[in-house]
Image (cartoon, coloured by chain):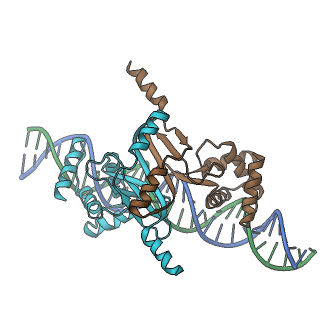
Chain colours: A cyan, B brown, C green, D blue
DNA sequence: TTTGTATTTATAATAATTATAATATAAGTT
DNA sequence: AACTTATATTATAATTATTATAAATACAAA
């Protein structure tokens, strides 16, 4: 964790941004909850637990900044809220998501399943792909099992 | 166009909804601007041109209804606004989008490029896919050409 | 007609996000 | 270590998109 913060600090500095305590606190929350998909409000509340003086606007600005630097990805699953998702270190692409329409759970797919598709888009549509967002909506494994059980 | 409205009317009736004049006016706008990705506000303003008495909330409710019936798809490209996109008749899936980060244009891909990927998701992750959202971010053909010209 | 339900309008409320202005602070420089 | 200055933060207000509410209306069935 410290390593990762250190590297992000350098990245910030290289773009002449500072790693303020508020930004560090926000980052720590994101790192601790890496597998979650927190909204700005979620992040705010979690940061507040350890740094109660932080303001909501600061969290928004920090997330925006991290988003520009491609440290986090801003996603929208269709509820009105933006969610923020830490990128895997060195990942060029956004990872994919599996959203269950039964229980609302969100699973991640870290593998890039779109390499072939991107080649097609590039060659057939002449579009130079830089990034993608892919979300599948459907029924997760747990809910499938649950459904089978109740019908038995 | 009339055909299509007629069929949607039947679909509404089959779910015991009515095709009110306001709903029809909204649908007509969506059909006329099928290739666009209008926000609720956009739709409202366009409907208002022909039916000035319509209210914004009605447009929202109509779009919500059409969305439930899978007649339109609600998409979010990351700006704060939801956009509404008419489905191709009979299409089971959402179509894909190419969003240009230079000029902001949005192109559509009607073909389903994800059949193979969905099979993988199904078999490897046990996730029963029902729908997907796929957006590519990058540089469109026009902007690529423009970039080449200016550097020459 | 009458009645009941669905729909709409107009407006208010809510919720997420962004802007503003005053204040505080990080980090380089002396 | 104190000084300086651009940058960042806080607290609050403003904005924007969307949803809820209540009264009015339309409309289909009895």
Q: Quadrant of residue C13?
A: bottom right
For image coordinates 50% across by 70% down, the residue present is: A102
- Nearer-the-camera pick, D26 or B139: B139
Q: Quadrant of residue D22?
A: bottom right
Can you say which quadrant of the picture contains the N terminus of chain A? bottom left
Relative placement, left or right, of B28 versus B77 is right
For image coordinates 76% across by 59% down, the residue present is: B10
Q: How many numbered marks are there?
A: 0
In percent of width and height, residue B13 lies at 75, 63
In percent of width and height, residue B24 lies at 74, 53
In percent of width and height, residue D26 lies at 82, 62
Q: Is residue B53 visible?
A: no
Relative placement, left or right, of B29 versus C25 is right
In percent of width and height, residue A101 lies at 50, 66
For image coordinates 30% across by 50% down, the residue present is: A71
Q: Relative to B102, say whether A41 is above or below.
A: below
Relative placement, left or right, of A70 versus B28 is left
- Nearer-the-camera pick, B119 or A33: B119
Residue most toward the top? B152
Q: Is residue A117 visible?
A: yes
- Nearer-the-camera pick, B132 or D13: B132
């Amino acid at each position: 964790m410290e390593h990762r913060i250190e590297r992000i600090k350098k990245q910030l500095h290289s773009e002449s941004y500072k790693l303020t305590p508020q930004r560090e606190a926000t980052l720590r929350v994101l790192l601790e909850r890496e597998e979650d998909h927190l909204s700005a409000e979620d992040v705010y509340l979690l940061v507040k637990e350890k740094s109660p003086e932080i303001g909501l606007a600061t969290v928004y600005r920090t997330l925006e900044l991290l988003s520009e630097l491609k440290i986090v990805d801003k996603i929208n699953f269709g509820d009105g809220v933006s969610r923020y998702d830490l990128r895997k270190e060195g990942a060029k692409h956004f990872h994919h998501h599996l959203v269950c329409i039964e229980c609302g759970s969100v699973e991640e797919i870290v593998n890039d399943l779109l390499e072939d598709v991107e080649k097609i888009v590039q060659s057939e549509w002449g579009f130079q792909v830089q990034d993608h967002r892919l979300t599948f909506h459907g029924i997760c494994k747990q809910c499938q099992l649950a459904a089978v059980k109740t019908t038995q």
